Image (cartoon, grey):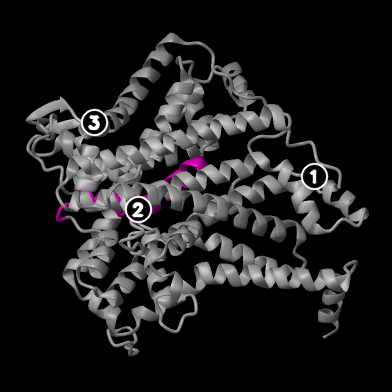
Amino acid sequence: MTTLTLNLRSWFNGLSETDRTIRLFVQLGVIGALSVAILLPLFSLLSKSVEDSDGHFVGLDNFLTYFGSQGLQQSLSNSLFISLVVTLIVVVCAFLYAYVLTHSRIPVKGLFRFLAMLPLLAPSLLPAIALIYIFGKQGFLREWLFGAEIYGPIGIVMGSVFWIFPHAFMILYTALRQNDARLYESANALKTSAFRTFMTVTLPNARYGLISAALVSFTLMITDFGVPKVIGGQYNVLATDIYKQVIGQQNFQMGAVVSLVLLAPVLITFVAQRYVESKQKVTVTSSSKPYLPSKKLSRDLLGLLVCLPILASMLLVVGTAIYASFVTYWPYNLSFSLNNYQFDLMDGGGWASFGNSLQMAAWTALFGTLLIWFVAYFNERAAQNVFLKRIVHALAILPMAVPGMVLGLAYIFFFNQPNNPLNSVYGTMTILVLCTVAHFYTVSHLTFLTALKQLDKSFDEAAESMKVGWFKRFINVSTPLCLLTIVDVFFYMFINAMTTVSAVVFLYSPNTILASISVLNMDDAGDLAPAAAMAVLIMAACASARLLHWLVTELISRYLQPWRIRAV
């Protein structure tokens, strides 16, 4: 009792009664909002998995039915196998590509790095569609498969490697770029061979990056829905099983069971990744020197020979999708035409779906950025109760471990309940925005935390000494200082909202169908060229957003000078 009293006194020390009340209610409000957006839907998913179609509790019967089904067991096996294969290929290719860009003097490195990011601008459906044009029954390179079918594991692997590659590359590029030049200077002084230097210096310094890249790649693959749906054929995986159970058979209970089964390996991977991060050691200190590779013609030529095929493969996929979208009738009439862009004549959602995506992405970016920035700041700089701060942080981290399809299905069970006062948002644009914000919440939250931790706390201490409240400091001090980060998160949310499929595939209505869902529907209807056109249009919108991001960043950096704080 004495300890509790001391803790409460310490918490309230220096705060007026009004300020204490406001901070407490804000903390509780943040926890309530995050619970509604993340925790309660997941609880509804868990509840549905132990009920029958009439809503009666049946315990583990649904799970026993699942594991007793040979087909569903095969889906689990397929998911694990294909994820391991994709992870191995992606990590090897991304490491080689990143190594060449950081440890050689090949020309136009910036262009190589920029082009490697192209898959981030496209929905995961785009590579699957492009591969059908390349290796399908009427593909121009179908002979390269030596009689094998692109529909199945081969297509899933190729399409997944394309869109997962930049995620692994960014991690490995960062890890390899931070090598200390003094270690290489010591190796040269000791006449160490290039191979031994690589094994004893480069590889050990990048090991955490390699592990993180592997865990991220595995998670992205096992939770992906777009590529297996379009090009998987009869090769079932867990993500497509969830879709078939819910959309095809209206078996929501089994869909919940498969979702929880999919959640298990993702949670294991998430815990492993957090463990790796906790063990990571500092490799760059104040005395470190950045590594600048010397010129060596043979090494640089070999580096080009490694990077060019990887880059050419990505450009082939993107280029094929763009070309196919402007072809009159593949492969019989290859003349230029805009017929595939007449979306209102197709089954899928029409031009309205693209407008809906722009609207949803804009609201997601605006609302999501403001909300996440406020929550991150308050929890890091203004919240007083340590226990409640930990709850908020845990809720903010949780979405990273929840696949998009699982979160979307959980939203159905929670918001579609008749007795839920929030039931009115079901089938509206609001639920799409809310789910998308929740889906991409963690990365944005951690980005803001990183920016806040880089700010000297003397700003807040000086403001407190002048009796300036936390909200005024939030508006006049921290927001201007973190303006570039806020812009980064805004465009991150916008681009991901434009390309997302799995998080919203269960939540749209006829009036809120999105462009990414329109691609899926047109592919199902056999309109492959219009599906490619819509995917290309999404990519063009994301590329435009990326260009605007660069322009806004340049404007802020040069003219607005975010380090100048208005007088409090």
Residue 550: percent from the left, percent from the top? 55, 31
Identify the residue shown where x is 24% and y is 52%: 348
| Residue 290 against residue 228 in the figure, above or below | above
Q: Which residues are magenta?
A: 207-234
Identify the residue shown where x is 73% and y is 36%: 562
Query: Quick check: marks 1 and 3 in contact, CB under 8 Å?
Result: no
Q: Is residue 62 left or right of residue 216?
A: left
Query: Quick check: marks 2 and 1 in contact, CB under 8 Å?
Result: no
Q: Is residue 477 visible?
A: yes
Q: What secondary structure is marked by label 2?
A: loop
Mark with earlier residue (2, 1): 1
Mark with earlier residue (1, 3): 3
Q: Is residue 278 visible?
A: no
Q: Residues within 10 Å of mark 1 (few under 14, many from 20)?
A: few
Residue 94: percent from the left, percent from the top? 40, 34
Which residue matches tag 2? 514
Residue 464: percent from the left, percent from the top? 88, 55
**Callout 1, which amino acid?**
Asp
Residue 162: percent from the left, percent from the top? 32, 38
Which residue matches tag 1? 456
Which residue matches tag 3? 320
